[in-house]
């Protein structure tokens, strides 16, 4: 066997050896070997969320998805379905403005307006419009900076 083909045949073994170094406890959400849904927000929990530029917010939980704006502080509430993926959870419903999907991802978040820290990044898509913000639950609350 020539030297180049020996190196090429050893490459797959080296990759397997590196992959074997990672234990299941070290897997992060979205790890290709982890097929379990993310469980950081329980099915019965309520997620509260907010965003700026423009200001918007709301909550989602067993009562449905409520979307608020400064022009509609009471908000619009619609039924929402929940989907737990490998890297977060999403909620889908239909607001008057169109189909809405709220994606909640575990990662530190800042609203950019205060010193508050949030445990989740949220992305809200309504129709073709996408908004980014932060979220929290009672179990994983927001905290003030300092």
Image: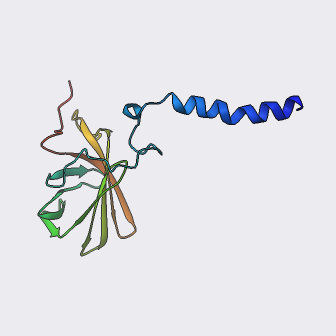
**Residue displayed at 57% across by 29% down:** 18
Residue 132 lies left or right of residue 143; in this view the side is right
Q: How many numbered marks appear?
A: 0
**Residue displayed at 40% across by 49% down:** 35
Colour mapping used in the image: rainbow
Give the residue furthest to the right: 2
Residue 28 lies left or right of residue 94; in this view the side is right
Image position, residue 111 (x, y; %): 27, 42
6 or 143: nearer the viewer: 6
**Where is 81 relative to 22, above or below?**
below
Give the residue furthest to the top: 146
**Residue displayed at 24% across by 35% down:** 117
30 or 4: nearer the viewer: 4
Residue 73 lies left or right of residue 110; in this view the side is left
**Residue displayed at 28% across by 50% down:** 52
Q: Quadrant of the C terminus?
A: top left
Image position, residue 134 (x, y; %): 27, 46
**Where is 97 relative to 8, above or below?**
below
82 or 129: nearer the viewer: 82
69 or 4: nearer the viewer: 4
Q: Quadrant of the N terminus?
A: top right
Image position, residue 16 (x, y; %): 60, 34
Q: Quadrant of residue 17?
A: top right
**Where is 110 relative to 129, above or below?**
above
Q: Quadrant of residue 27?
A: top left
Image position, residue 101 (x, y; %): 31, 63
């Amino acid at each position: 066997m020539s030297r180049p083909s020996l190196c090429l045949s050893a490459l797959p073994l080296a990759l397997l050896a590196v992959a074997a170094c990672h234990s299941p406890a070290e897997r992060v959400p979205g790890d290709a070997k982890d097929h379990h849904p993310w469980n950081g927000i329980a099915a019965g929990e309520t997620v509260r969320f907010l965003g700026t530029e423009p200001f918007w917010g709301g909550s989602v939980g067993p009562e449905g998805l409520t979307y608020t704006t400064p022009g509609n502080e009471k908000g619009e509430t619609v039924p929402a379905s929940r989907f737990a993926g490998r890297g977060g959870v999403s909620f889908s419903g239909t607001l008057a403005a169109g189909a809405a999907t709220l994606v909640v991802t575990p990662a530190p978040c800042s609203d950019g307006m205060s010193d508050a820290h949030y445990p989740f990044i949220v992305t809200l898509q309504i129709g073709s419009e996408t908004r980014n913000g932060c979220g929290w639950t009672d179990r994983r609350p927001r905290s003030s900076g300092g």
